[in-house]
Image (spheres, rainbow, N blue to C red):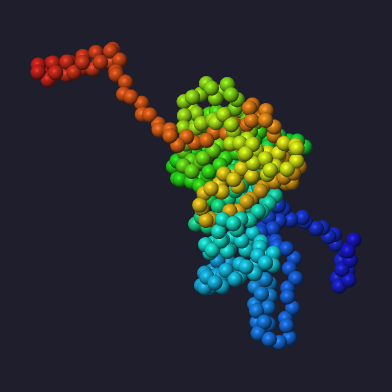
């Protein structure tokens, strides 16, 4: 045991491991190891080198207030230095994205192992919509409260709830009730107004009842369920719930494989997470939004190991993609005539009231 020579005490020493929440906070500022340039002995270039060294050594102190008073060319030059040096951490990317000078090509991938709502909200949320979020959630522990808290991310553009790996216990964290809770928040407070694509994998409690809630998300273009509690027979018997959403004969994701086979290398079928990621890039690539995108992955495993390969039969039996029908218009219900017995009661009450008024007899 360690011995303190000054006071002669023997003590036990233990090292406490930082929790996931603390590691996430540190990961936000993590960047590649930089080799700072040395200062030249003479010449005007020494001022430029000194500026770079000072900037990179204080990246953790960078915030939007330190950039808002700088001229636009200076901010662009700082961003170029950051890119060229590989010093783009999540913190730095979000600060520069808040200036409004980044565009759709300046997306940023980031993996988050902790699924605490506080971490996710702090990393993903941009109240002023400075950036959008493509969120994928894998084998992490989530409860109903965590799932409902996703509706508090106003800049969420796409959401992919993946199935867990085979060596992880299968858990049900998504259901029709949670979709209904999202829909109520979206209807009452305008939440999830930017959500355009929704993918849910392996959640048996997600059924065709979900379809009646999709209309409350104004920007939603497509909802895809993979191996959920939806089958062809259920869809055929629920035309009213499917109203406003259509199922094409050729699934849009399957069409991507057919029309662009060169993007999928090898003879084996593509992995489902990879196919979804390519479809998102292809589908949303036609939009003219100039906002940068944060591609956030919440998972403890790698994409390659967690991915499940899909084949043609999956698109016929287990993969259903519902697209918003732009030609659909809800038809108001016609007023129905009152039953004969009710009309007779109404006429009788009127006659009794008139008799009381004329004769004074109750």
Q: Which one is in front, 209 or 273?
A: 273
Q: Residue at x 75, y 65 (%)?
A: 33
Give percent across and percent down for residue 302: 74, 46
Q: Quadrant of residue 203?
A: top right
The quarter of the picture where the N terminus appears is bottom right
Q: Residue at x 45, y 45 (%)?
A: 189
Q: Which one is in front, 280 or 185?
A: 280
Q: Is residue 154 left or right of residue 172?
A: left
Q: Which one is in front, 114 or 356?
A: 114
Give percent across and percent down for residue 245: 49, 32
Outermost residue toward the bottom in this view: 42
Q: Which one is in front, 132 or 285?
A: 285
The quarter of the picture where the C terminus appears is top left
Q: Is residue 141 visible?
A: no
Q: Is residue 42 left or right of residue 177?
A: right
Q: Is residue 139 left or right of residue 100?
A: right
Q: Residue at x 71, y 39 (%)?
A: 270
Q: Is residue 278 visible?
A: yes
Q: Quadrant of residue 234?
A: top right
269, above or below 118, in the image:
above
Outermost residue toward the left in this view: 358
177, above or below 101, in the image:
above
Q: Quadrant of residue 13?
A: bottom right
Q: How many marks?
A: 0
Q: Residue at x 40, y 33 (%)?
A: 329
Give percent across and percent down for residue 49: 68, 78
Give percent across and percent down for residue 69: 51, 72
């Amino acid at each position: 045991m360690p011995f303190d020579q000054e006071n002669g005490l023997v003590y036990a020493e233990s090292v406490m491991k930082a929790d996931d929440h603390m590691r996430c906070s540190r990961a936000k500022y993590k960047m590649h190891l930089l080799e700072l340039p040395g200062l030249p002995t003479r010449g005007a270039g020494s001022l430029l080198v000194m500026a770079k060294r000072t900037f990179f050594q204080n990246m953790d102190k960078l915030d939007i207030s330190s950039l808002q008073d700088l001229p636009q060319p200076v901010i662009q030059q700082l961003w170029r230095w950051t890119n060229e040096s590989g010093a783009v951490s999540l913190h730095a990317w979000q600060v520069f994205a808040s200036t409004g000078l980044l565009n759709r090509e300046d997306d940023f991938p980031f993996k988050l192992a902790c699924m605490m709502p506080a971490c996710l909200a702090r990393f993903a949320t941009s109240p002023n919509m400075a950036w959008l979020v493509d969120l994928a959630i894998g084998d992490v522990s989530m409860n109903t409260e965590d799932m409902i808290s996703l509706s508090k991310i106003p800049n969420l553009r796409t959401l992919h709830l993946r199935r867990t790996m085979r060596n992880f216990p299968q858990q049900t964290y998504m259901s029709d009730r949670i979709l209904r809770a999202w829909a109520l928040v979206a209807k009452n407070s305008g939440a999830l107004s930017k959500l355009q694509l929704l993918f849910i994998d392996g959640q048996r409690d997600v059924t065709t009842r979900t379809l009646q809630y999709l209309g409350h998300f104004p920007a939603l273009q497509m909802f895809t369920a993979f191996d959920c509690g939806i089958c062809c027979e259920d869809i055929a018997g629920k035309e009213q719930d499917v109203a406003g959403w259509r199922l094409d004969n050729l699934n849009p994701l399957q069409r991507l494989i057919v029309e662009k086979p060169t993007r999928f290398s090898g003879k084996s079928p593509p992995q489902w997470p990879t196919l979804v990621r390519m479809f998102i890039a292809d589908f949303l690539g036609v939009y003219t939004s100039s906002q940068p995108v944060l591609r956030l992955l919440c998972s403890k495993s790698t994409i390659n190991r967690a991915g499940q390969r899909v084949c043609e039969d999956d698109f016929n039996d287990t993969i259903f993609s519902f697209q918003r029908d732009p030609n659909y218009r809800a038809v108001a219900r016609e007023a129905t005539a009152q039953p004969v017995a009710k009309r007779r009661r109404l006429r009788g009450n009127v006659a009794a009231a008139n008799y009381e008024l004329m004769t004074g007899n109750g």
